[in-house]
Amino acid sequence: MTRWGEIEMIPLKVFKNILEVNTWGMVRVTKTFIPMIRHSKGRFVNVSSVSGRWCTATNAMYCMSKSAVETFSDVLRYEMHKWGVKVAIIEPGHYGWTTRVTKFLNSDKNRADDIWQGMDDIAKQDYGRPYVDSIVDTCSLDQRVAGYLDNTSVIDAILSKQPKHRYVISGLLGPAAWRDFVPYNIMPSWWSDMKMYRQQEALGIPAYLKDKKKTM
């Protein structure tokens, strides 16, 4: 579950709703079944995302919810080791279009309307509707790239006697994802910031900054 938009544009209740589904739902289910899994020496397989270790602008809610899944699953793995229980994390990189879940999303205009209606008057004035439309257009284009079809990694996480701690499955976006994903986790923040700033520039200029630039 996610919703696009910059942090200032999204109401607090939307943050809470996404965390409730993506993070707290997993925590509740896990805690419910821990005793049974411990006694049976089963395993936990939690679905996170590459966004849990690689954040992007306009996607704060999803990234923070999946980052919490990553941390929770790591701690769970440490604690379950003494019980002989395995914990694996699935990190999909591009499954939305493959599963056709995107067909259930509203049209781009409706998604832009949702963001716009959730903004206060100051945010509307400073960002402007064209900037909001640009965010939706850019994110929507990414969702329409051909997705990943192979489920081998998922099966391995469930059935392997020695599952990996993490399974990064990003399909056709794999080379591109790893090109950015690995440096993001090991390089200084200024390095990754440069790429993120370029992505921000591609969205255009908020109305307030555009008007200010005209008067300079």
Image: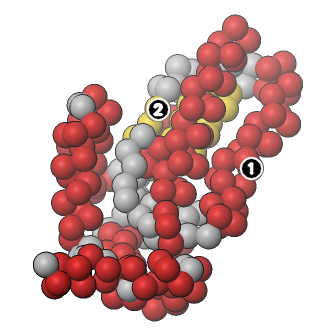
The answer to whether residue 175 of the structure is visible from this angle is no
156 relative to 77 in the view: left or right: left
Task: Give coordinates of residue 94: x percent, y percent.
Answer: 40, 58
Q: Which mark is residue 25?
A: 1
Give the vertical position of 69 relative to 93 (above or below): above
- Residue that extends furthest to the top in the rendered view of this protein: 82
The front one of 89 and 73 is 73
Task: Give coordinates of residue 126: x percent, y percent.
Answer: 39, 80
Give the vertical position of 18 relative to 141 (above or below): above
Task: Give coordinates of residue 93: x percent, y percent.
Answer: 39, 52
What residue appears at the point 19 percent right and 40 percent down from the top-left corner?
191
The front one of 91 and 123 is 123
The front one of 216 and 136 is 216
What residue appears at the point 65 percent right and 64 percent down from the top-left corner?
12
Give the vertical position of 85 relative to 207 (above or below): above
Amino acid marked by disc 2? Arg
The answer to which quarter of the image holds residue 187 is: top left
212 relative to 108 in the view: left or right: left
Residue indicated by mark 2: 166
User: Label 2's element?
Assistant: strand
Amino acid marked by disc 1? Gly
The front one of 159 and 115 is 115
The answer to which quarter of the image holds residue 204 is: bottom left
The answer to whether residue 129 of the structure is visible from this angle is yes
